Amino acid sequence: MEERLRKSLLYDFYGELLNEHQKQVFSAAIFDDMSYSELAEEFDISRQAAFDLVKRINNKLENYESRLGLVKRFLDARDKMEGLTKDVEELRLVLDKIDLETKEKKNISGLLNDIDSKSKEIFDNL
């Protein structure tokens, strides 16, 4: 996974566990793509302090992830959801090729829609 995406997911899941200053610095570094020099100027600290702070915050977020595993569970659920969505689409294609009465096709199609929407709802609630 791209490092930037991983850091933003870590921040999304664990950012509220940081103090306000840490949130501001990490958010500026990751979401605003500020360099260490820009961070130093923005937060009135040295470039080395900006580097150290971002590194410490990242380590802290990685530590939360190693203990709690929320990002991993989220990514696993997303992958399963994508697989389920593909399976439902394949079933729709097969259904189109099968010669069934219109009522039966509508029932099966409705069930597939229910499966698809319920699985998306479950994923959205993660």
Image (cartoon, rainbow, N blue to C red):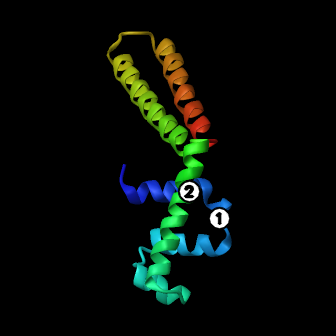
- Please, is residue 96 above or below residue 50 in the view? above
Residue type beneath disc 2? Leu
Q: Secondary structure at mark 2?
A: helix
Dot 2 crowding, Cα within 10 Å, few <14, some 14–19, many 20+: many
Observer-nearest of 30 and 49: 49
Dot 1 crowding, Cα within 10 Å, few <14, some 14–19, many 20+: some
- Please, is residue 111 above or below residue 117 in the view? above
Q: Residue at x 57, y 38 (%)?
A: 123
Observer-nearest of 104 and 71: 71
- Residue 71 can be seen, yes or no: yes
Residue 97, horizontal then vertical, whole percent: 32, 16
Observer-nearest of 93 and 5: 5
> Residue tagged by mark 2?
61
Q: Residue at x 46, y 68 (%)?
A: 30
Q: Residue at x 56, y 47 (%)?
A: 65
Toward the left, the furthest residue is: 97
